[in-house]
Image (cartoon, rainbow, N blue to C red):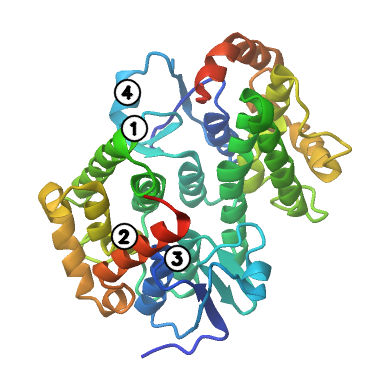
Amino acid sequence: MAEEVKLLGSWGSPFSRRVELALRLKGISYDYIEEDLSNKSPLLLKYNPIHKKVPVFLHGGKPVVESLVILEYIEETWEGDHAILPKDPYERAMARFWSTFVDEKCIPAIWMSCWTEGDMQQNFMIQSKENLSILEGELKGKKFFGGDAIGMVDIAAFFIAHWAGVLQEVAGISLINEEKHPILFKWIEEFMSSSIVMECLPAREGLLAYFQAKKEAIRATKAPVY
Amino acid sequence: MATAAKGVVLLDFWVSPFGQRCRIALAEKGVEYEYKEENLWDKSPLLLKANPVHKKIPVLIHEGNPICESLLIVQYIDEVWSNNPLLPSDPYERAQARFWADFVDKKVSECWTRLWKVKGEAQEEARKDMIEDLKLLEGELGDKQYFGGETFGFVDVAFVPLSAWFYTFETCGNFSVEKECPKLVAWAKRCMERESVSKSLHDPHKVYEYVCQLKKKLGVD
């Protein structure tokens, strides 16, 4: 009998949506539990006592946390359909490298570009555009970072495909467009037209309203609210 | 018996705990490689070509292919040379190992970069965070021989190079690792009995000397 699969997530979190995307690509059924991040549940605090964040993935009651660690776990546990990592060790190392690049470089620079002002904002915007150009270079004529099919790097870059656009609109800045990053722009179109991706993303209008409402609070702390 | 692997080069810097992770992993697997010391103030064309994105060491070059980021390098080494596995075979245990290695980087290394650069209240906060994070790691170790259980594993490789920095953490932060986390100190001593570790790590006083010189060079203090 298959063990129970549960996911603690948050509606607006690009990190919990990553896990949902991976599960859906592999056709794995799961129970989803929505967390109120302003009032964290005892379940969340029990299963992720160190970071106290979503996503928390539970398989047979055993927790795995940190979205990229969860993606590797899912890949190793459900080997059959839709591989999200290559088999070759060098290609795997590259996929892990670029996923980490998205998390440690692209996302923080984009986030900070949206909530800072003046010279600081200018610096973050320059960094963001540079990082996105570097990332774009990795596509190298492929349909997706994963090749013909969506892979781990594409899943990690979900934030760039969807959340980044919303945040830019809220902040009134432009970081990604067809002129500046034509290849990345094309990847966004391709990625966002996948029916499985469309199933997984929080509605744009909803996300927009959410960040507009939290604008002042985020500006004050710069802390992520998902 | 050492495996004469085809074209393995490690671009590294003597005191780097990140580079040491790779040296330990290669030694555990018995892989022969060429060690190239980089001058971080005057980076070689080879380093800049092999790691154009971050321009950092360590970089492992295997059959002409560069792999960057120490934990990714260790995983690569584990996958290519399957003797003496560093990661467990069970996916759940692997996830826990990845989590804790990531914790060492996200928390302990992060605390350290605050601890030596700031003063006053900010340093006090960094000190508290560092002790808390070391205690969490000690909790994970428990009464096990290694983080990997009976066998020396991925988290041990990830964390043990920082044990050569305990003296530096203590001196800069004004606390005692032995007093706060005696099990970690005992674990570090056990790891040092392994040749892969003792040959890769430097004397803690040498590490401290290096940090003092670095502080002077950067005008911190």
- Distance from the alpha carbon under mark 1 to that under mark 3: 26 Å
Number of residues whose C-alpha sits closer than 10 Å to that of mark 1, classed few (under 14), some (14–19) or many (20 or more): some
Residue type at mark 3: give it: Val
Look at label 4 and name its amino acid.
Answer: Leu
Q: Residue at x 40, y 74 (%)?
A: B23
Residue B186: quarter of image: bottom left
Q: Are marks 2 and 4 in contact (CB under 8 Å)?
A: no
Residue matched to label 3: B74
The picture places residue A114, in percent across and down from the top left corner, at 66, 25
Subunit under mark 4: A
Residue A189, x across and y down, in percent: 81, 35
Residue A224, compared with residue B80, is above or below; it is: above
Residue, far right: A179
Residues at discs 2 and 4 both on one chain: no
Residue under the image location 41 percent in, 45 percent down:
B106
Q: Does residue B145 appear anywhere in the picture?
A: no
Horizontal side of B63 relative to B207 (left or right) equals: right
- What mark, if any, has residue A43 been given in the picture? 4
- Indicate the amino acid at tag 2: Leu
Task: Kindly indicate whether the residues beneath marks 1 and 2 are on one polypeptide chain.
Answer: no
- To which chain does the residue with label 3 belong? B
Q: Which residue type carries mark 1?
A: Asn
Residue corresponding to mark 2? B162
Q: Nearer the viewer, mark 3 or mark 2?
A: 2
The residue tagged 1 is A48
Q: CA distance from mark 3 to mark 2?
A: 16 Å
Residue A89 position in % (x across, y down): 56, 66
Left-right relation of B90 to B150: right
Foreground residue among B92 and B77: B77
Q: Residue at x 53, y 51 (%)?
A: A79
- Measure the alpha-carbon separation of dots 3 and 4: 33 Å
